[in-house]
Image (tube, grey):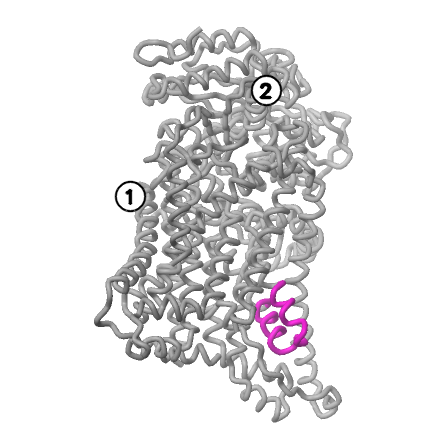
Amino acid sequence: MKPFAYALAIGVATAQIATSALALDITGAGATFPFPVYSKWAEAYRKETGNGLNYQSIGSGGGIKQIQAKTVDFGATDAPLKGEALTKDGLVQFPTVMGGVVPVVNIAGIKPGEIKLTGEVLAEIYQGKIKKWSDPKVAKLNEGVKLPDAPITAVYRSDASGTTNIFTTYLSDVSPAWKSEFGASTTVSWPTGQGGKGNEGVTAVVKQVPNAIGYVEYAYAKQNNLPVALIQNKDGQYPMPGDESFQAAAAGADWKAAPGFGISLTNQPGAKAWPITAATFILVHKNPADAARTAEVLKFFRWAYKSGDKMASDLDYVPLPDKVVSQVEDEWKSVTKDGKPVLSN
Amino acid sequence: MNASPAAVSEPAPIARPAPQEWGRVRASRRSADKLLIVGCTVATALGAIVLGSILLMLIIEGVRGFTPTLFTQVTPGPGSEGGGIANAILGSLVMTVLGIVVATPVGVLAGTYLAEYGRTSQLANLIRFLNDILLSAPSILIGLFVYTLMVRPMGGYSGWAGGVALAIIATPVIVRTTEDMLRLVPGTLREAGAALGAPMSIVIRSVTWRAAQSGIVTGVLLALARIAGETAPLLFTALNNNSWFNSNLMGGVANLPVMIYQFALSPYENWRQLAWAGALLITVTILGLSIVARLVLSGPKGR
Amino acid sequence: MVALSENVALAERAPVARRNPSPVGDRLFRGAAFASALLVLLVLAGILASIAYGGWPAFREFGPGFLVSSAWNVGREQYGALVAIIGTLVSALLALVIGVPISLGIAIYLTQLCPGWARRPVAMTIELLAAVPSIIYGMWGLFVFAPLFARFVQIPVSNVVEGMPIVGTLFYAQVPSGVGVLTAGIILAIMIVPFVASITRDMLDQIPTVLRESAYGIGCTTWEVVRHVLVPQASVSIIGAVMLGLGRALGETMAVTFVIGNANRLSASIFDPGSTIASRIANEFNEADGMQLHALMALGCILFVVTFIVLIIARLLVRRAKVA
């Protein structure tokens, strides 16, 4: 019986530890897109303040479910919740950082930024209507560029993801046909092409298949030197994707137009605006059961707005404009416990 | 149905025709025979090549990540200098041990019930069958079950939930091997025990269990190997943690499989490096465990 | 195998130990063993109940049509299980078609051909394949196997069969990326080989040596011994082993997710991407909400039912083998 006696002893000992006081480490979960930057911030924040923050990427849908179920202190989502959903669950939503999605191609002899596409052309490629790179619609945009007379392989994210949501939101913005048939979602019933799991999977397929086109997060394309294709924006220009063009997309937007700042940044006006730009969002309870923990969450993001910009840029994310930050901090006053804001000063 | 490694016995040497006798064999029979030999050898070689190439891939990609800080520091942010996976290693250890500590008594006792008490009764057959289903249930659904059972009622992720999910995966493995091993114990041993006047529980504990000891230990080690690499059930139960976790295991607990899953598909070189190092570490550990399990079994007592 | 045969006999014999006058400890022990066994039953019942509960709204909404619809449109909330069911069955079937001959080859090699000193290390190497974590298989499949497979199999084969009837559809890769249903089948085959091979090897070892010796004695070649003596003797047990392998192939998640391409399309070509029930759950569960979540849970129910059926068949076959 000895092993059981040991097992029992271990069990009792661990149970005792379990009942000891809870540390104030806060937990958040959700969107995959901001996972690197939140991890970076959490690391720096811990060094600076000693307070821990654990953020895990389980997917935006997961983040929303978990904050509703109150298993986490904050949820994170790439696709903003609508006003009525926020009211229904008593949630407050605010953006943290922005980023872009870029199309990447694998065509022999084509250098990064050399090939140009419009939104409609991109949508038709993913619908399977444009089948070859030599299609007149593509050729017209790329005079002087030698494009192969070869079939296009459209590569997409096979796992449900915020990246797909941003990309299809853009396609729905520019193509009524796309909007009516497939719409914007984290998973789409793709009519053509091939799926890859995660940014990594998409990249692997694009690299593997000649004449393929895929879409990945900008950070991913940049870190891996993938050849990007340029997209015509609302002003008819072809900006290079990057900090500047993502910021330009956010500059003209009216963030207060939707509850919880839930506006779409795709296809914004501005000569330099990158058309497939999006922000990522945080969700907290409006009247949290544990005010201290929610206050910690807000303190963390207040710190991040103030000191995290450089870290975000280094990872190819784009910090929010200052104007939006002050609007967000105003909004935090609505997070209350017994009528008092949880975040003082 | 004895899938257990114990059922392997060294077959007695067989007298095979000597090669020179080929002269009396028809060409078609000869070529069929050659084909079989070549085919079987190639099949075996294929298995070895696959294992070799998996290990080679892990070593090529993972060895660079084996820095001194790998075992001492927590997972870093993207692009940060240094850092390791010490938190994930410890978390994985804690939850795996927790899973095994829960699963071993339950699994051994349930296996004992099936082999010694239940035998061919209807209920025993039903449990045996359900155990086999549990053995091949997709682990993601087990994670989901524990989420509903523990994470939601407790109001948060915890290492306890992760340990329970792993225990549910480990238990059927232990039940199965324990039963198989106990059934291999000759009935005469039990009869001898009973003849001495020992009640059944004493016979089981001091005779049957002892005789099957190494086999049961193997089952536990195999279960350990199985759960140490599980990703899907931990994602919904233990979550993960980018730093040290609470000593009471409440909140997310870092673990290797989820860390590998998140970091391997990220754009940042230092994260990917850690993911590969973690993958190498976990695979080598599990392979080592499996080898130990088989050596234990083939020890003097196992035969 | 003295022990085994005796144990079979034991099952039919009367209990060997005295039951009455049993001390409290004896009853306690028996109770603990019984409770543990019941716990196994309860856990599975709990898992089934929680998944059935989650999937019920989807079954109610789509009815039996859920099984035969190939739609999976999140935007329109239209869901059907057909593509995933077919993908699951096809990839598992491919895994068997590829994996079983290899497993038999390995088992025959180990029992008949391998020199004695090499038997243990070779057997261990094969069994270690079962110890590699599923996610590692996925990464190996995506980064190592898929590029090689595209270059040396998909592209040449597609070039040869293009335009031919039937094979031209079945083996034509529109996108030679190396991932697809066949790739998933191959990875699954590798994953079930250690199971099927070791069970088969045990079965072959149990065949009385005298049978083999007699066959060799009348001048049979190794092939003839295998074909006419060993395989008929062990065939039913081998089928049982294969069914257990099938059970594993059906539920495999992580590895398949990496290499199957995850498309919701029915395609005649096994080079094209598809999806399985488990891979779809793994891919979409985190982002799913509302009806999509129910549909995924309903897929989980279907997977359980399929596994049930496979295991029942396996059990019946093996039982018949034991009786025979």
Give the quadrant of residue C31: bottom left
Q: Is residue C109 magenta?
A: yes
Q: Mark 2 points at which residue?
A: A275
Residue B218 locus on image (x, y percent) = 50, 62
State whether residue A128 appears in this view. no
**Badge 1 element:** helix
Q: Which of C26 and A105 is in front in this view?
A: C26
Residue C7 vertical placement versus C268 (above, below): below
Give the quadrant of residue B156: top left
Return the chain for callout 1: C
Position of C41 compared to A229: left or right? Answer: left
Residue in view at x 44 percent, y 46 percent:
B98
**Badge 2 element:** loop
Residue A55 vertical placement versus B218 (above, below): above
Residue in view at x 56 percent, y 26 percent:
A39
Residue C95 locus on image (x, y percent) = 54, 60
Residue found at the very far front of the displayed protein: B196
- 10 Å crowding of disc 1: few (<14), some (14-19), many (20+): few
Residue found at the very far left of the displayed protein: C21
Distance CA(mark 2)–CA(mark 1): 42 Å
Residue in view at x 62 percent, y 19 percent:
A311
State whether residue B219 appears in this view. yes
| Three-letter amino acid code at the position of disc 1 | Arg
Residue C122 locus on image (x, y percent) = 64, 67
Q: Which of C23 and B88 is in front in this view?
A: C23
Which span of residues is magenta-colored? C102-125
Return the chain for callout 2: A
Q: Which of A230 and C248 is in front in this view?
A: C248
